[in-house]
């Protein structure tokens, strides 16, 4: 088959298109383009006011005030911790129309200017990295600031953190997960029998609530309802514990005077020690070697009813 020559004009046009595509490809490979999404920055450190009133307006930050989230200084060098690589700094300077080296950690004119800091109100502020080069700068210097928690788990682990930075998408997933947990807890609560509810209060936090036969239904319902509303995961962890019934049994034995607690030790009245803690005793009562003791205790407990 005879090979045909491609006209010079067509070759030039093809090469021109390829060159444009090559330039566009290079332009898309900026380092700063990898930072995308929306992030929520909000107060997370509680003030002393919480000790007086946990529902006070100023528990985190008063509604009429704002916290300027400024970059921090490096303890060793005294320079601004920008969180930017040299390449990222040059790319952001170009995008924002700034003079070269404006984002250098040595340039106090930029880093000391309050106009470049996000103002954080009580409800938080959104950093939109998709539509703001300044938001990218703020996001990067906040990530290397020790006063900023990178997510709520980080904030819980370190009470010294003052602000929390989390993606709005992650925040939405977290809130969705919390709602699902609470709905699941209320659904399980709704399906519990009266005896299950009484047993729960006996077991919850190793018998925090003293429940006896005179306890009213209103007290039981309102107390569990408050736990489900405020601590739904703890409610589910207690109810779904495979040793839940044994925990209730142990509490009944304690109330009935069949087992004595001395310090952290649990012993059968007139008999030997069973365990060194509440959970240790529950585990022992579930084991085959303590089956005779458990049967004996159950028989004596039935006679008390």
Image: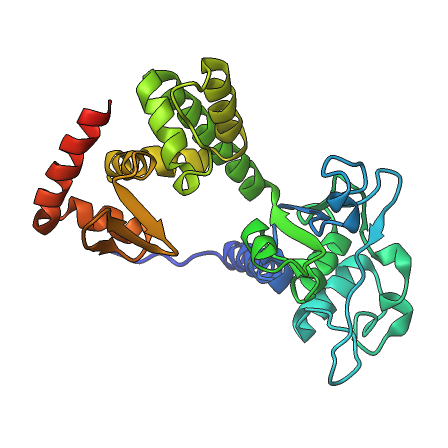
Taking the image as shown, residue 25 lies to the left or right of residue 288, namely: right
- Which residue is at 64% across, 60% downward? 32
- Which residue is at 90% across, 62% downward? 113
**Residue 192 visible in the current orientation:** no
Residue 52, position in %: x, y? 77, 42
Residue in front for this viewpoint, 193 or 292: 292
Looking at the figure, which quarter contains the C terminus?
Answer: top left
Taking the image as shown, residue 280 lies to the left or right of residue 225, namely: left
**Residue that sits furthest to the top in the current view:** 217
- Which residue is at 42% across, 27% downward? 211
Residue in front for this viewpoint, 106 or 131: 106
Residue 155, position in %: x, y? 61, 54
Which image quadrant for residue 64?
top right
Chosen colour scheme: rainbow
Looking at the figure, which quarter contains the N terminus?
Answer: bottom left
Q: Is residue 203 above or below residue 188?
A: below
Residue in front for this viewpoint, 186 or 54: 54
**Residue 105 visible in the current orientation:** yes
Residue 128, position in %: x, y? 70, 45
**Residue that sits furthest to the front in the current view:** 270
Residue in front for this viewpoint, 204 or 305: 305
Which image quadrant for residue 241?
top left
């Amino acid at each position: 088959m005879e090979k045909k020559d491609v006209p010079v004009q067509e070759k030039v046009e093809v090469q021109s298109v390829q060159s444009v595509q090559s330039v566009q490809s290079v332009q898309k490979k900026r380092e700063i383009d990898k930072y995308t999404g929306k992030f929520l920055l909000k107060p997370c450190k509680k003030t002393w006011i919480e000790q007086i009133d946990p529902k006070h307006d100023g528990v985190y930050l008063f509604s009429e005030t704002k916290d300027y989230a400024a970059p921090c200084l490096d303890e060793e060098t005294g320079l601004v911790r920008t969180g930017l690589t040299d390449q990222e700094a040059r790319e952001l300077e170009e995008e924002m129309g700034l003079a070269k080296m404006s984002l250098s950690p040595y340039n106090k004119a930029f880093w000391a200017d309050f106009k470049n800091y996000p103002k954080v109100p009580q409800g938080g502020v959104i950093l939109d990295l998709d539509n703001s080069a300044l938001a990218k700068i703020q996001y990067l210097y906040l990530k290397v600031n020790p006063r900023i928690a990178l997510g709520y788990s980080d904030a819980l682990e370190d009470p010294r953190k003052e602000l929390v930075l989390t993606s709005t998408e992650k925040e939405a997933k977290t809130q969705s997960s919390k709602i699902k947990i609470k709905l699941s807890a209320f659904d399980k609560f709704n399906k519990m029998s009266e005896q299950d509810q009484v047993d729960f209060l006996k077991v919850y936090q190793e018998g925090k609530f003293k429940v006896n036969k005179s306890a009213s239904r209103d007290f039981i319902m309102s107390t569990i309802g408050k736990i489900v509303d405020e601590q739904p995961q703890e409610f589910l962890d207690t109810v779904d514990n495979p040793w839940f019934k044994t925990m209730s049994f142990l509490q009944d034995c304690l109330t009935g005077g069949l087992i004595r607690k001395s310090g952290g030790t649990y012993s059968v009245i007139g008999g030997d020690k069973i365990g060194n803690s509440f959970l240790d005793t529950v585990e022992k009562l579930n084991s085959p070697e303590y089956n005779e003791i458990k049967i004996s205790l159950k028989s004596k407990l039935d006679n008390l009813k």
